[in-house]
Amino acid sequence: MDSPLRFKPWIVLLIATVLLAACAGTARGLKTSVYQNEENISVVDYSLSKADAMVVIRYPAIIHADAEQSYFHAFSINAIGGEVPPANRTKKATTRIAQSVIAKSNYYVMTLYRELQKELPPDTVLLSPHIIMWDREKGIYSRPILATEQIPSVVTVDFNVYSYPDTEEMMESPPVTFGDLVTPLFVVHSNRWVRPPTHGLWLSSEPLVQAAWQQSSTQARKEVESKVDQTGAVYQRPLDFIAFLNTRSRDRQNLPLKSVGGAHRDIIAVEDYPVEKIKMDGVLLENLSNDWTQDPFAESFVKGAANRVKQTLNWVNHDRATFFARQNALARFDPELAIAFFAQSGGESVRTRLQLAEALIEAERKFLASQSLGLYEGAYAGDYGTKMRQMIEGEYKLLEKRRSEARKQNVTAAVAALALIGSVYGATASGAAGAAFMQNFAGVFMLGSLWAMSSTFKTQAKSAEMSEHFLSLIAPALERQISVQMEWLESKEKITAIGFAEFRNKTLSLYQARVRALQTDVTDRCVFKHPSFSETGRWYGSCKGGLAAERGYGVVKDGSGSYVEYLGTAQEGMASGTGGMIVRAANRIGATYYEGNFSSGLPDGTVKIEEPGRKSRVREFRAGLDVGKGNTSELQALVF
């Protein structure tokens, strides 16, 4: 007969499993983010326009009452990090966690805003808080509370934090934002013309990448359709996180993706940011409510993420990134001027009106920058931020107590297991003693988890209250009087308003009072053609005999959803000369971009080509056919 002190492998494995389960219950996180080693860089801006913002940061700020139940349901069934059991989806604690995501996003986004704001030129980092809405046709969606996204921006960042919906798993491995643990979700995108193969999408958190890609694809298609149909409608992109929640079962496309950093940085693909549960420095959290001079979230994640955003700003041609948004902004003041902008028409009257309109857009940006600063002062430096820091500090101390208890339990459990293992093994013939022991043994850990969770519920309830009262806490920052000085040519004008609607009325009135007659031959009723399409499209620019000519912008699409966009010079209705062309086939992932010389609507000569999942390359074309490697020195680049 075996000695009771000789351990069977399955017993050792059982002990290890129990002890590891207790360790998992200590809610550990990563000490460093994958972006933590990003080199700190300065942004160089060679753009011609002073009207644009560098970065717009979008985030979920509040839930409309009509959308609450739909949001809570979508949050519970679209869990990141695992599947939530149906019985746990309707618990009140799950609702509290869903609310805490909004409340904490309002707070943590301000660290990213502050980090970028102090590094980039004044008034060029703008906040765009979103309200979560619902209707029968769209489901849940979001729309901006402010007019921030109407300002041309080089890049746009979607940001929020996340917690796993199932409270029974909160102390285990799934992502969570609680105490010293933060799980950021992060998307960076810009105009489709900056990176046509990915529709302008630069990077995305892995769980959101399918939704972010679909959003960018839809945005590109909608903007093309508005130009074809001449509606002038500007597509409002919901938050990518909300779009992710809105559709549980979506077809997963085989997208062009690449990992963070590495040797594939020059591949035209979306950077796939992994889900990170980051552990912030406990020393900085011990007395956070009284001393927040050093932000723990900035140290653990935001500084690296901000450097990644600045890196994108240095890669991007700013005039290219804002070209179409500037055209949309100009159309609000003067639709005729917006068409002339496409054609880059010369003449004193065009230049004067363009300078005035851009000066007014710059003034609007400064007004919105002041509102963003007001949001920061309310949600970070003000009462809201104070309450959030108190809550985070309390959560951290709660977690630390739970971790301490878990460590003590690990030691106690190990001693008890070694002392009693002989009798457990000795009783396996009947099984009764072993079963009773294991039941009591597991109960030690279960009681600890229940204690931690009951305390957690109370803390999460506070975050729900913070979310519900968010607008009342920061509304004074949005309704204060703001004055902006506009400079145009030799004159200066101070514009003062309470609220952006009043400010815009004043900028429009100023423009209409000072414009001169526009003397140039541009139209939006001209025909643009492409050899691959039987349909004719629309041209915005110079026109001869009803056909596209000289400089302008052309677009044509068919019934399948395929389309061609072209910016450059044309002749007899088709691309001819130097330009850039986006070709999107409805049955293919992404788009193909050609830049260089064209003839009769096709690439002809030295042309740069960009495709999803490949490096940019310069090739030689003859009547649309690739005939070999091109000479980079002969490439005629498109000027924005």
Image (spheres, rainbow, N blue to C red):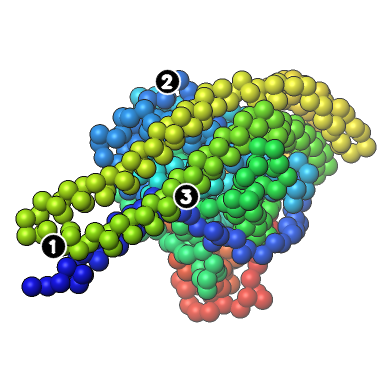
Q: Nearer the viewer, residue 106 or 271?
A: 106
Q: 10 Å neighbourhood of mark 1: few (<14), some, or many (≥20)? A: some
| Label 1 SS | helix
Rendering quarter of residue 254: bottom left
Pointers 3 and 2 in contact (C-beta within 8 Å): no
Name the residue: 21% across, 47% down.
439
Q: What residue would you read off at disc 2? A: 66
As helix, strand or loop, the secondary structure at mark 3 comes to helix
The circle drawn on residue 612 is none
Q: Nearer the viewer, mark 3 or mark 1?
A: 1
Give the residue pinned by disc 3: 404
Q: From what the image shows, is residue 265 above or below residue 171? A: below
Q: Mark 3: which amino acid? A: Ser
Mark 3 burial class by Cα count in 10 Å: few <14, some 14-19, many 20+: few
Q: Earlier in the sequence, mark 1 or mark 2?
A: 2
> On the rendered structure, is 122 left or right of 606?
right
According to the picture, the residue beneath numbered tag 1 turns out to be: 426
Q: Nearer the viewer, residue 113 or 182?
A: 182
- Residue 302 locus on image (x, y percent): 62, 51
Relative height, residue 422 to residue 122 (above, below): below
Name which residue type carries label 2: Asp
Q: Quadrant of the C terminus?
A: bottom right
